[in-house]
Amino acid sequence: MVKKNACIFISGEGSNFKALYKYSKEKNFPVNIKLLVTSNIRAKGVIFAKKVGIPYLVYKNNKLSDEFKILNKIKQHKISIICLAGFMRILSSNFINVFGKKIINIHPSLLPKFKGLNTYQRILQNKEKKTGCTVHFVSKKLDGGKIILKKFFYIKGSDNKKTLKIKTQKLEHTSYSQAIIQVFNK
């Protein structure tokens, strides 16, 4: 199997990045992670990237010059897919068009419900019976691209924002890799 090169975009802990990195070391996983992009130089995911020898770039803002620099690096690394994993910025239409390949995102709800931020709080306020995560293609509409995969779990009466986040992230760590496999096996 010839693996495709992937770039992961993060803003924080990088727990999905770490999970994807672990899967990328498996022989039959379709991607190798070649680059990390972060909107936060203090993100814990950057520490992990340094530890495992993955180069990283800082995405400071949505300026064209910043995007051009990142797109240039992505081209140099022959990236076939970008995986947004807790990246707290919206990619511009220009970026999406210029990259012109697969960009996927993982969102901590069962889309189309609860697009955007403050997801766990809104799920609890709405008294949902179940929640989970969705992996989808990135489009110009916020959390509106074609869905690749959804996974869910039932919410308990004792759940709060913290427990929902823990349960959702655990589900995300396996769901994201499954979605990547699906994308490349079609």
Image (cartoon, helix red, strand yellow):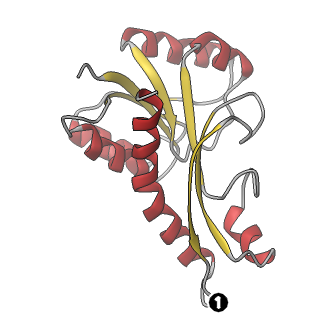
Any part of residue 20 in sight? yes
Q: How many marks?
A: 1
Which residue position holds label 1? 157
Left or right, 13 with reference to 136: left
Q: Residue at x 65, y 58 (%)?
A: 109
- The image quadrant where one finds the N terminus is top left
Q: Is residue 30 above or below residue 48?
A: above
In front: 36, or 130? Answer: 130
In front: 150, or 59? Answer: 150
Q: Residue at x 25, y 19 (%)?
A: 2
Q: Quadrant of residue 156?
A: bottom right
Crowding at dot 1, Cα within 10 Å, few <14 / some 14-19 / many 20+, comes out as few
**Residue most extreme to the front:** 186
**Residue most extreme to the right:** 126
Left or right, 68 with reference to 91: left
Q: Is residue 182 above or below residue 157?
A: above
Which x, y percent locates residue 116? 74, 50
Left or right, 151 with reference to 178: right
Any part of residue 42 in sight? no
Which x, y percent locates residue 145? 70, 35
Q: Is residue 150 above or below residue 29?
A: below
Q: Quadrant of residue 119?
A: bottom right
Label 1 amino acid? Gly
Which x, y percent locates residue 127? 77, 79
SS assignment at label 1: loop
Q: Residue at x 28, y 23 (%)?
A: 3
In front: 85, or 150? Answer: 150
Q: Residue at x 70, y 15 (%)?
A: 94
Which x, y percent locates residue 108? 61, 57
Q: Quadrant of residue 24?
A: top left
